[in-house]
Amino acid sequence: MPLPTEPSFKVAAAHAASEFLDLDASVDKACRLIEEAGAQGARLIVFPETFLPGYPFWIWSHTPAESAPLFAQLYEQSVELPSDATRRIGQAARAARAWVCMGLNERDGGTLYNTLAWFDDGGRLIARHRKLQPTNAERTIWGRGDGRDVFVLDTPLGRLGGLICFEHSMDLNRYALIALGQQVHVSAWPAISAVTADPNSGNFDNLTETAIKYHALAAQAYVVCVQSRVDEGAIEKIGLSGQEDKIRVGGGFSAIVAPNATYVAGPHRDDETILYGDIDLGMIPFAKFFADSAGHYARPDVFSFGIDATAQTPLGVSHGSGWHVIEPPDGDEHGVLEAEPELHQLTE
């Protein structure tokens, strides 16, 4: 495993509300937050689950008849990869000289996906992770990812990867990232602590804290956890103003956790902020000394599994391997690169 060229750096978690169901305004806000975090020296900037253009909070409170018009709005305002929205985020990442992990609703044909989109510090869209299994009522909104969505990125900041919300309960999904050598993990969630109609709402901070601390310990990795918050605009758009038994302003639980399961920063709740923390990858070998979960503390003679990275599509199509151009950003003749995925790796 090559050593990162930047073993110490600052990360930023944008604990923020979307401009709900307004893609252009949400992209504008994301670009402002990227600029602000970049000015503070952040080299990795992460955003909550489906920040563009917001999490479908109504799924926990509305009937299907009430939900359908809101889904139609979400579908219309969702993000295609690539698109003008991704170009703008890429330009902001390049201007800030920062890597960005952006949670978004991805539109592909007639289906939406819960996606983390990764941008390098040159502004290139280099990878996407689709949530492998939408949780409970989320299955009325999003399709499923597949084995192509299990990867880590080999970068100057170390080996980066991420999961979304209750994917952290999928132990083989997490262990796959551990086995691929993950060093910094993005943990993206919605502000369910403010969605009081959800039966997990009152316990959601505890569930989040348990998940992120355990992954840091088991992976011997840093975890950058970022959750959204709910603002009055979102509550008004879903028609629940004044109904705090269903949803309230605020929420979210954001934190940065070290490989020994202690807090580097946070936890932060409710109010909008950018949470910063310093990553020192030199701490990881001390954690690996006691238990390297994919090395000397693994037992492949007893337990083993694999990743099927085949595209799960209705129509079978043979694909070549290697990199292919998705989209050239403004002024970049080299284009944007995406890998065929068991392991995404940046190349010149």
Image (cartoon, rainbow, N blue to C red):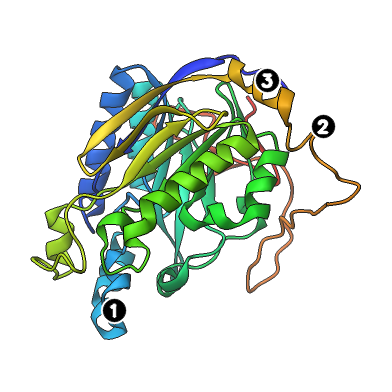
- Please say whether residue 47 is visible from this viewpoint: no
Q: Specify the farthest residue to the left.
A: 242
Residue 319 relative to residue 71: left or right: right
**Above or below for 157 versus 254:** above
Disc 1 versus disc 2: nearer the observer:
2
Which residue is tagged 3? 285
Please tell me whether mark 2 sits on a helix, a strand or a loop: loop
How far separated are the C-alphas under marks 1 and 3? 50 Å
**Above or below for 137 versus 224:** below
Front-lying residue, 146 or 295: 295
Query: x, y (%) of residue 116?
Result: 47, 47
Q: Are marks 3 and 2 in contact (CB under 8 Å)?
A: no
Query: x, y (%) of residue 187?
Result: 47, 43
The structure residue drawn at horizontal position 47% and vertical position 66%, both measured from the top left corner, is 135
The structure residue drawn at horizontal position 31% and vertical position 53%, both measured from the top left corner, is 191
Check residue 184 in the rendering and tell me which mark sits there, or answer none. Answer: none
Which residue is tagged 1? 68
Query: x, y (%) of residue 207?
Result: 44, 53
Please tell me whether mark 1 sits on a helix, a strand or a loop: helix
Which picture quadrant has residue 132? bottom right
Quadrant containing the C terminus is top right
Type of amino acid under label 1: Ala
**Above or below for 237 versus 159:** below
